[in-house]
Amino acid sequence: LVHAENLGGDIDKISNKRVWIGLFPLRGIELESSMCRIMAWEP
């Protein structure tokens, strides 16, 4: 289950498009949550 919030930047460029979304969390031990880099690619 993924809950992503505070997404911003170029999010308007991919609205109403089909994209591949990748989510890359920072590594850590015994974390309940982590900051992530979320990227989108157009196929």
Image (cartoon, grey):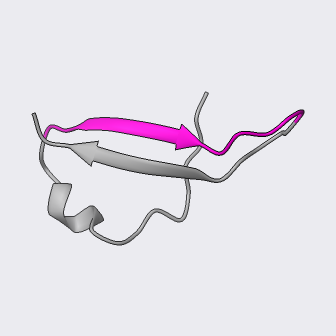
Q: In this rendering, is residue 42 above or below 8?
A: above
Q: Is residue 32 located in the magenta-colored stretch of the structure?
A: no
Residue 32: percent from the left, percent from the top?
Answer: 83, 39
Looking at the image, residue 10 lies above or below residue 28:
below
User: Observer-nearest residue: 22 or 17?
Assistant: 22
**Snapshot quadrant of residue 2:** top right
Please identify the quarter of the rendering in which residue 28 is found.
top right
Pinpoint residue 11: horizontal percent, then vertical percent.
29, 63
Total numbered circles: 0
On screen, residue 21 versus residue 29, left or right, reads left
Looking at the rendering, the stretch of residues picked out in magenta corresponds to: 18-30
Q: Where is residue 23 drawn, in percent x and y?
A: 47, 39
Identity of the residue drawn at 28% across and 46% down: 40
Q: Between 1 and 10, which is closer to the camera in this rendering?
A: 10
Q: Residue furthest top?
A: 1
Residue 27 in the figure: left or right of residue 5? right
**Left or right of residue 34: residue 10:** left
Horizontal arrangement in the rendering, residue 34 relative to residue 38 (left or right): right
The quarter of the displayed image where residue 31 is located: top right
**Which residue is most to the right?**
30
Q: Quadrant of the N terminus?
A: top right
Quadrant position of the C terminus in the picture = top left
Q: Position of residue 29 (x, y in %)?
A: 86, 34
